[in-house]
Image: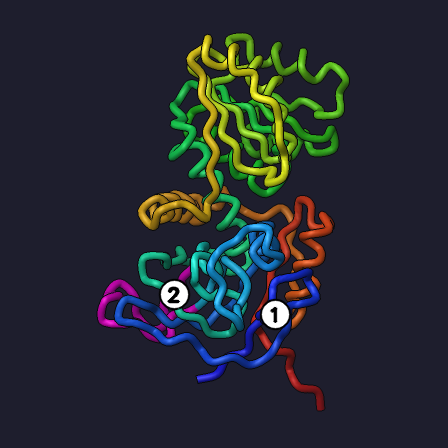
C-alpha cells in the first residue's frame, strides 16, 4: 500500500524534505494503522531532520512526531482500537519509528490515545506536544504539589501557556515572565503575577513576587540563567530544564546544595510509554474541558512540510503552531 508523505533521504536543512509517495510501513500485531487528518511541526522535529539530535533514522524517513487521525485497522494485540476511532499520538519520528507527516501511518498501540469527542483535530494536534511536555515537566520531573509557587519563564509560548494552565489547576501559584504585550494573556490562563522579562528590575520583581522563594522553576525561553534561578529557589526548590539544546550555563553549586535544591533535565523523547500515557490522560481531560487551546494556528497542506520546518527553525512561528493538513485540494473544473 502506498501513501503520500513528507520525508527525507538524508539529514540536512529544511529543503531536504521531499513530498511524494512511499510504502505504508508494515503493521505488526500490536500496531494500529491510522489515516492522518493533521500533523504538526515541533522544534525537536527540526533537530531530528538536521541531525542535531541523533536518533535511529531509516531512509526514506517520514518526518514529524504528532498526529490526529482515524483508525483504519488494528492488530490483534491492540484491542482498544476500532476502525473509525479518532486518535492522536505525540511520539512518532524518533527512536527508529517512522514519522507522522503522511496520509497513512502505523502507530504502536501503546503510543496512541483516543481523542475526546468535540475536540477539533487541528486544536488537539497543536497543543498535544507542548501540553504533554508541560505535564511531564510539572508532575513527573518537577513533583509539583498544591500550594507551591511555580515560576514559568517564557510563559506566553506554547509550552509556557500549558504550564500555567496545568500548574494553576493543580493549586499552585504561578509567577510568569513574558513580554508586557502578553501579560493579560498569561493572566487569563491562570498566572497570579506576570513580570515583563525586559524590565531592568526583573530579578528584584521576581524576588518580590516569590517572598518565600520559588518551589519550582521552569524556563521555556531557553535562556537557562541558572545563577538567577538558583538564587530565586526556596529551600528544596527544583529547577526543571526542558529547552536550550545549545546553552551552557554556569551552575552555582554551593547555593544549590546548601538549600537542598536540585536541577533535573528532561526531554519528552526520552519519556517512557507509561509516562506518555499519563500525560495523555491529563491532556485529554483538559482538551475535553476546553482549558487547553492553541493561541494561533497556521494551517498548511502536507506538501508544504519543508516550509513549515523553515518557519519553525527560523523562529517565525513564535506563539503560533504550524499544522499540516492531509486534505487534498478539490480539483478545479
Residue drawn at x 70%, y 63% is: 307
Instruction: Residue 80: give its label.
Output: none
72 magenta-colored:
yes
92, above or below 174, in the image: below
Q: Which residue is mark 2?
A: 107
272, above or below 29, in the image: above
Image quadrant for the C terminus?
bottom right
Q: Secondary structure at mark 2?
A: strand
Image quadrant for the N terminus?
bottom left
Specify few, some or many for label 1: CA neighbours under 10 Å numbering under 14, 14-19, or 20 or more. Answer: many
Which quarter of the picture shows residue 260?
A: top left
Q: Which residues are magenta?
A: 70-88
Residue drawn at x 61%, y 55% is: 46
Q: Which residue is mark 1?
A: 302
**Residue 289 position in % (x across, y down):** 44, 45
- Confirm whether residue 161 shows in the render: no
Which quarter of the picture shows residue 157?
A: top right
Amino acid at each position: 500500500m502506498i501513501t503520500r508523505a513528507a520525508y527525507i533521504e538524508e539529514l540536512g536543512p529544511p529543503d531536504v524534505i521531499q513530498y511524494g509517495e512511499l510504502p505504508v510501513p508494515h503493521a505488526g500485531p500490536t500496531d494500529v494503522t491510522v489515516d492522518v487528518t493533521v500533523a504538526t511541526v515541533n522544534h525537536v522535529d527540526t533537530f531530528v531532520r538536521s541531525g542535531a539530535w541523533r536518533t535511529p533514522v531509516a531512509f526514506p524517513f517520514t518526518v514529524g512526531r504528532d498526529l490526529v487521525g482515524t483508525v483504519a485497522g488494528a492488530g490483534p494485540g491492540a484491542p482498544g482500537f476500532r476502525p473509525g476511532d479518532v486518535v492522536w499520538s505525540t511520539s512518532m519520528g524518533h527512536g527508529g519509528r517512522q514519522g507522522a507527516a503522511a496520509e497513512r501511518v502505523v502507530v504502536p498501540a501503546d503510543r496512541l490515545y483516543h481523542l475526546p469527542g468535540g475536540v477539533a483535530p487541528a486544536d488537539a494536534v497543536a497543543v498535544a506536544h507542548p501540553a504533554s511536555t508541560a505535564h511531564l515537566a510539572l508532575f513527573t520531573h518537577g513533583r509539583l504539589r498544591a500550594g507551591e509557587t511555580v515560576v514559568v519563564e517564557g510563559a506566553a509560548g506554547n509550552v509556557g501557556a500549558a504550564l500555567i494552565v496545568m500548574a494553576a489547576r493543580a493549586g499552585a501559584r504561578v509567577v510568569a515572565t513574558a513580554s508586557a504585550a502578553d501579560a493579560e494573556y498569561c493572566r487569563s490562563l491562570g498566572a497570579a503575577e506576570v513580570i515583563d522579562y525586559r524590565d531592568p528590575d526583573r530579578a528584584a520583581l521576581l524576588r518580590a513576587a516569590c517572598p518565600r522563594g520559588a518551589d519550582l522553576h521552569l524556563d521555556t525561553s531557553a535562556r537557562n540563567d541558572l545563577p538567577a534561578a538558583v538564587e530565586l529557589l526556596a529551600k528544596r526548590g527544583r529547577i526543571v530544564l526542558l529547552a536550550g539544546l545549545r546553552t551552557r550555563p554556569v551552575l552555582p553549586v554551593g547555593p544549590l546544595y546548601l538549600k537542598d535544591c536540585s536541577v533535573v533535565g528532561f526531554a519528552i523523547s526520552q519519556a517512557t510509554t507509561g509516562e506518555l500515557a499519563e500525560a495523555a490522560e491529563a491532556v485529554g481531560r483538559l482538551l475535553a474541558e476546553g482549558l487547553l487551546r492553541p493561541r494561533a494556528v497556521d494551517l498548511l497542506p502536507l506538501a508544504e512540510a519543508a516550509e513549515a520546518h523553515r518557519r519553525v527553525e527560523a523562529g517565525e512561528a513564535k506563539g503560533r503552531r504550524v499544522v499540516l493538513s492531509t486534505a487534498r485540494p478539490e480539483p478545479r473544473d
